Image: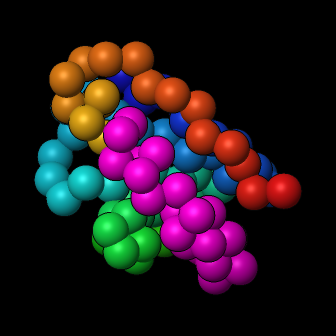
């Protein structure tokens, strides 16, 4: 299962329960998907259009503690918490 934790500018942000290391989230935009590690925010695998990737990395830089909290929750099969979108 992959709960959506945020959505902004046509991008949906998801985290899988009990996903593999390193800690990351999934950014989806249309048919594109990227895995983004968030400490520090960087592209781990996949691709997004450059402007979209920039927004996703900017968003991740604003929410490291919340992303880490959700990662720990996901690893323990606990409900995830929504994170505020980019304005």
Residue for point 16% across, 46% down: 20
Which portion, as a residue range, is magenta? 49-70
Left of 6 or right of it: where is 23?
left
Identify which residue is drawn at 53% across, 56% down. 63
> Above or below — where is 5 with respect to 66?
above
Decide whether residue 59 is among the magenta residues. Answer: yes
> From the image, which quarter does the N terminus lie in?
top left
Residue 73 screen position, x and y as percent: 30, 28
Q: Quadrant of the C terminus?
A: bottom right
Find residue 56 and report its horizontal and vertical position in percent: 60, 65
- Say which of 49 and 59 sits in front: 59
Which residue is pictured at 44% across the width and 25% down the height? 80
Q: Is residue 26 visible?
A: yes
* Image position, residue 79 (x, y; %): 40, 17
Q: Residue 46 vs residue 82: left or right?
A: left
**For the stretch drawn in magenta, what is the main secondary structure?**
helix
Q: Quadrant of residue 19?
A: top left
């Amino acid at each position: 299962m992959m709960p959506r934790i945020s959505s902004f500018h046509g991008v949906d942000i998801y985290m899988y329960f009990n996903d593999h290391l390193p800690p990351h989230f999934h950014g989806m935009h249309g048919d594109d998907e990227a895995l983004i590690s968030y400490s520090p925010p960087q592209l781990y695998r996949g691709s997004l259009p450059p402007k979209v990737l920039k927004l996703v990395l900017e968003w991740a830089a604003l929410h490291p503690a919340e992303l880490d909290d959700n990662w720990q929750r996901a690893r323990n099969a606990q409900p995830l918490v929504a994170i505020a979108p980019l304005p």
